[in-house]
């Protein structure tokens, strides 16, 4: 999912030219979609879920899949897990920095100007006469 997000962030597509040839490729796309639906129906069909294929083991009531997964992930696979997280972090930072562009007409803040502001630039004291009822 993260890699898909990177691809979407990196692409800066204009959708109008991509839609021009939609009608001419529609029959090919519909045929491929029908083949995929038929294949999925065959895989998920009633013959696939017969009771003699799987040997389910019974567990105690207090058994937790999440606890078992966490235990395995943070003991046996801790280094690959940490390496993958660092690689994904670097990839996220790289994708953001590559797609960050200066665009005209966008509003942004300048922190150095915000720090240099004095009280007199922002606050105006007004003396008004008190109203009597």
Image (spheres, rainbow, N blue to C red):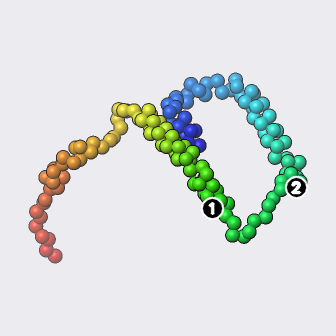
Task: Give me the disc on residue 82.
Answer: none
Where residue 72 sits: x, y (%)?
63, 55
Residue lying farthest bottom?
Answer: 133
Q: Is residue 72 above or below residue 2?
A: below
Q: Is residue 130 left or right of residue 23?
A: left
> Residue at image x 13%, y 52%?
120
Which residue is nearer to you in this view: 40 or 125? 40
Q: Quadrant of residue 59?
A: bottom right
Q: Residue at x 75, y 35 (%)?
A: 33
| Closest to the observer, 32 or 95 | 95
* Disc number placed over residue 67 in the picture, else none: 1
- Let me know if residue 13 appears in the view: yes
From mark 1 to mark 2, how far is it between C-alphas?
Answer: 28 Å
Q: Splitting the image into 4 quarters, where does residue 21 fall? A: top right
The image position of residue 36, as x and y in percent, is 77, 36
Q: Nearer the viewer, residue 102 or 24?
A: 102
Q: Residue 65 appears at what percent x and percent y?
A: 67, 60
Residue beneath disc 2: 51
- Residue 41 visible here: no
Considering the numbered disc 2 on the image, is that residue within a helix, a strand or a loop? loop
Q: Considering the numbered disc 1 on the image, is that residue within a helix, a strand or a loop?
A: helix
Find residue 2 and report its image quarter: top right
The picture places residue 62, in percent across and down from the top left corner, at 69, 70
Closer to the camera: disc 1 or disc 2? 1
- Quadrant into which the N terminus falls: top right
């Amino acid at each position: 999912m993260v890699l898909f997000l990177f691809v979407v962030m990196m692409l800066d597509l204009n959708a109008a030219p991509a839609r021009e040839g939609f009608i001419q490729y529609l029959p090919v796309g519909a045929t491929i979609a029908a083949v995929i639906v038929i294949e999925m129906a065959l895989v998920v069909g009633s013959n696939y879920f017969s009771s003699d294929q799987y040997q389910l083991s019974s567990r105690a009531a207090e058994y937790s899949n999440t606890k078992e997964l966490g235990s395995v992930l943070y003991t046996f696979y801790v280094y690959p897990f940490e390496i993958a997280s660092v690689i994904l972090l670097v990839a996220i930072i790289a994708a953001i920095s590559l797609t960050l562009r200066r665009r005209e007409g966008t509003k942004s803040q300048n922190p150095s100007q915000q720090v240099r502001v004095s009280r007199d630039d922002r606050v105006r004291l007004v003396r008004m006469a008190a109203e009597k009822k």
